[in-house]
Amino acid sequence: MRSLLLLAPLAWLLLVQAKDDAKLEDNLLVLTVATKETEGFRRFKRSAQFFNYKIQSLGLGEDWSVDGGPAAAGGGQKVRLLKKALEKHADKEDLVILFVDSYDVVFASGPRELLKKFQQAKSQVVFSAEEHIYPDRRLEAKYPTVPDGKRFLGSGGFIGYAPSLSKLVAEWEGQDSDSDQLFYTKIFLNPEKREQINISLDHRCRIFQNLDGALAGGDFATGLPD
Ligand SMILES: *[C@@H]1O[C@H](CO)[C@@H](O)[C@H](O)[C@H]1NC(C)=O
């Protein structure tokens, strides 16, 4: 009941914000991989349209290389598609790209809020953070410790400047069935690469709120306002 009561004023605030955000569209591009128009994907698109995000879906019509879709092991296909899509953006220094899963994600605020939080993170690339290490638990000791918040890299959502994201995926030569999360984790856990590409994790979930099963799957909302 309480949540229903909150909805009315919130929706109004968000509408006002959405209008404002239209002019920021040129600096921000949302890329996602969806091979099918699932209900989850349509929900994702509706929330994107509500806030005036410009989104580009990669992979529609392609088969998932691993049964169970994007959330299952694998995910290499997502890196391959991202790498290809970034080719034409590699030199755009002002372009910020958000790469997110779409079947279990909704937007909770507009581009302005998202860009603000990204800039506050003071990194070229920011990954969502998870409480549990996956897929290789033996890497735990290599992870920097954090005073509080979530310690481990999640590949379900990340945001960064286009040239830095290009550097991030440049080395990808894996198979579609390989783990994207392991690929990014290994880059992050290499101190030289982490510093050179300038990657951080969203430990405090300021950009990526992982709802940890509050909805089905490992859903999260991006960019909840303060
Ligand atoms: C990382 O990027 C941020 C934002 O552009 C910048 O302020 C910071 O100095 C960079 N850090 C390093 C180590 O290059």
Image (cartoon, rainbow, N blue to C red):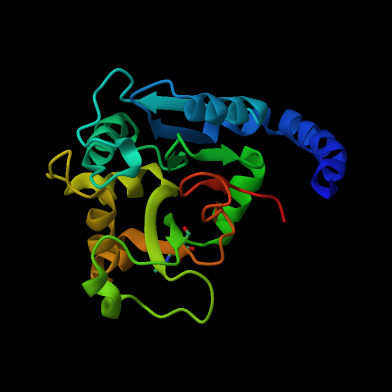
- Left or right: where 59 falls relative to 126: left
- Left or right: where 27 falls relative to 68: right
Decide if residue 90 is in sight here.
no
Q: Quadrant of the N terminus?
A: top right
Decide if residue 165 is in sight here.
yes
Q: Name the residue at 17% across, 47% down.
A: 178
Q: Name the residue at 41% across, 33% down.
A: 32
Residue 22, relative to residue 162: is it above or below?
above
Q: Quadrant of the C terminus?
A: bottom right
Position in image of residue 163 (x %, y %): 34, 45
Q: Name the residue at 21% across, 37% down.
A: 66
Where ligand 1 lies, by quadrant? Answer: bottom left
Position in image of residue 169 (x %, y %): 25, 46
| Quadrant of residue 141 within the rendered picture | bottom left
Q: Looking at the picture, tell me which residue is in the foreground, 17 or 205.
A: 205
Residue 123, relative to residue 42: is it above or below?
below
Q: Looking at the picture, tell me which residue is in the foreground, 51 or 139.
A: 139
